[in-house]
Image: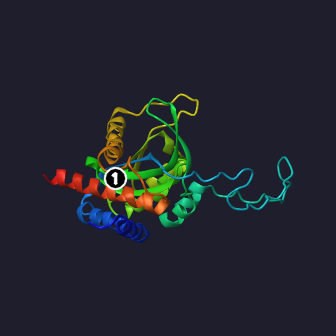
Amino acid sequence: MPSEATFSRAFAEFAASKLPQRVHEALVREHVSPHVVHHVSRDSTEIDGREKAAAKLKGKAAEPVPAAPERKRGRPKKGDERPPKEPTRLERQVEQTWQEAMEELPKQCDWGTKKDSNGKKHTWKGFKLHRDVADHGIPLSAVLTAASPHDSQVAIPLAKMTAERVIHLYELMDSAYDAKVIADFCRSAGRVPIIERNSRGHEVVPMDPATARRYGERTTVERANSALKDDFGGRMVRVRGHAKVFAHLMFGILALTADRLLHLAA
């Protein structure tokens, strides 16, 4: 058995080279890519960190933002043109590669808040793991961000990553992903988005029975999140730093993927 110091150095090298991510991608490409995936379920789960949370910038943005030119109130005069509206992050992500989009998202340990299945808010310190899962609970792709970004900020880059690995027909997401830009992006790529509507204080028209039945398949990602934490080390992260935490989780996802493929072949 290697000594603790030797194992630590080896694990640091695995994390820096993204070894578990590359092995997982190869596994998905070899065993899942030859088949059409019917449903891809998307969700995130909190990951507790064992390090100090990064301090939030007060009164300042992470990067200096140039002041917008002052505009007169009311309608512009004839012949005058208002400056074009800056695109939102989701709108930029449509044109970016998934790697470029992920570079804009924070990855340090910080504080996050999320509602549980009962609608109660839960706060934690650490990270957030975002995953796409196929039918039968097979993990297809995963990214790790800081705990603070909203789930919707990761939907488009994660969808692009998954699309590079498999052909799929439906994308299932909960109300956190209810944004027109996300739905339009899925349709433009030839896939059908099934997203739970966010009421935003208004009455929501329920899904038709056929769509609701398909949406019920999204429980696969929730079961996969539970399996990762309960059986594959997701609750016992003892390393620090984004790269090492992600490597630890990806080794668990790699084992979970192999387990689901073996069950499917049995």
Task: Check the image and name the residue furthest to the left.
Answer: 266
**x, y (%) of residue 183?**
48, 49
Query: Which is nearer the eye, 180 or 223?
Result: 223
Compared to residue 7, the image places residue 61 above or below, namely: above
Label 1 element class: strand
Query: Which is nearer the eye, 194 or 53?
Result: 53
Q: Amino acid at mark 1?
A: Leu
In the rendered structure, the answer to whether residue 88 lies left or right of residue 174 reads right
Residue 112 seen from this side: yes
Report the residue marked by disc 1.
169
The residue drawn where x is 52% and y is 61% is 102
Compared to residue 28, the image places residue 179 above or below, namely: above
**x, y (%) of residue 25?**
33, 65
Q: How many marks?
A: 1
In the rendered structure, the answer to whether residue 95 lies left or right of residue 171 reads right
Q: Quadrant for residue 200, please give it.
A: top right
Query: Which is nearer the eye, 259 or 207?
Result: 259
Query: Which is nearer the eye, 117 or 254?
Result: 254
Q: Quadrant of the N terminus?
A: bottom left
Q: Quadrant for residue 246, please give it.
A: bottom left
**x, y (%) of residue 101?**
53, 62
The residue drawn where x is 48% and y is 39% is 175
In the rendered structure, the answer to whether residue 213 lies left or right of residue 85 reads left
Display colour scheme: rainbow
10 Å crowding of disc 1: few (<14), some (14-19), many (20+) = some
**x, y (%) of residue 29?**
29, 65
Residue 159 seen from this side: no
